[in-house]
Image (tube, coloured by chain):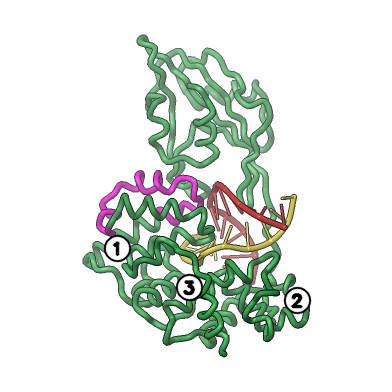
Chain colours: A green, B red, C yellow
Amino acid sequence: MSFSGKILDWYHKNKRVLPWRKTTDPYKIWLSEIILQQTRVAQGTPYYLRFVETFPTVGDLANAKEEQVLKLWQGLGYYSRARNLHAAAKMVMGEYKGKFPDNYKKLLTLKGVGDYTASAISSICFNEPHAVVDGNVYRVLSRYYGIDIPINSTEGIKYFKSLAQKVMDPENIRDYNQAIMEFGAMQCSPKKPLCLLCPLNESCVALEKGLVDQLPVKLKKTKVSSRYFNYLIPIYKDAKNNKFTILQQRKGKGIWQNLWEFPLIESKASLELNDVIAGSNAVFDGAVVKDIHIYNDMDIVHKLSHQHLHTKFWIVDIEADLSNKIPVEKVTEFPVPVLIADFIKAFKF
DNA sequence: AAGTCGGGGCG
DNA sequence: CGCCCAGACTT
């Protein structure tokens, strides 16, 4: 049997029941594909279910506030996916007059849709013979065919796309694409692949040569930098003892764009109380600071892919009134990074 | 071609 | 602690 035949055969016996496998609605398939980019099925599934329930159609998503989309996305990471998702929904309702793009080329024009996602949607929904190449496919192909070209090099990306296209089954592309990914996730896993029980173990080059644990080859990891965050949590009590604080939206280029956070002082190194007292005047210009004290004794180190955020939360009691204040009960309504969400959850306002 | 963008799970 | 996850976009 051919490579694709064995993959398909394995898939029909071993595939998981997943919510997006019940439909070929391009809107829902697109949703699932964006959510699952660089994200495990287990982590993405509850988000998929919430999105489909909250926004049953692409029009519903387009009509939502970005704020609501980000809130629903909170905790999934790579928030540009959520912003692009919303923008793409508006493109579908505008430029495509509400009809979801129905071929690879049109799909590629949507924000946040690259070669992988366009291939996935066009094959699953419209039976177009475009082979997907995700992390699973890189692993399966590099092992089975014994290819050591780095998968994240320009040459590797081109080579594996071409190889994937050559060995796919164009007649069953909808199942084949999902099959090879499922096979990579369940059988040909990154660590401890199940070679002993593998339907391809008689013809796998990596297994024959003992290179399974060395493939695929991936170029050097990026180095991690450290940043020092000091969040100032202002607390103002009015005459009726209602409590207020401040959240502000992150703008500009870096992490967490358009998410909300407390007023922030970033520094080159860890700050002491006196530094924060000095800096707080600029942050709350005019307002009278009654007291500042540290919330977390030790720095909280929030780890991202290539940044370690050494974080201190400072509780700032304010006497005079604050501009832009929000009632503390409202803080949970804003889309915030996990670092902030964890603080809000633990802190008793 | 290299960097950037999150958060979580696993060995 | 390092690696990887149904990648895309910017520089």
Upstream in sequence: badge 3 or badge 2: 3
Q: CA distance from mark 1 to mark 2?
A: 46 Å
Q: Are marks 1 and 2 in contact (CB under 8 Å)?
A: no
Disc 2: CA contacts within 10 A as few (<14), some (14-19) or many (>=20): some
Cα separation, mark 3 vs mark 1, equals 27 Å
Could you tell which of marks 3 and 1 lies nearer the N-terminus? 1
User: Which residue does the image show at 53% across and 33% down from the upper left?
Assistant: A264
Query: How would you rate the neighbour count of disc 1 (Cα within 10 Å): few for under 14, some for 14-19, many for 20 or more?
Result: some
Seen from the viewer's position, the closer of residues A199 and A230 is A199
* Circle 2: element type: loop
Checking the image for residue A211, the label placed there is 2
- The stretch in magenta equals A57-82
Q: In the rendered structure, which amino acid carries the disc numbered 2?
A: Leu
| Mark 3: amino acid | Gln
Say left or right for A171 vs B2.
Answer: left
Asked whether residue A300 is drawn in magenta, I would say no
Q: Quadrant of residue A299?
A: top right
* A215, above or below A17, in the image: below
Q: Amino acid at mark 1?
A: Met
Q: Between label 3 and label 1, give the one nearer the viewer.
A: 3
Mark 3: give few (<14), some (14-19) or many (20+) Cα within 10 Å: many
Callouts 3 and 2 on one subunit: yes
Magenta segment includes A61: yes
Which residue is labeled 3 in the image?
A: A178
Quadrant that contains the N terminus of chain A: bottom right
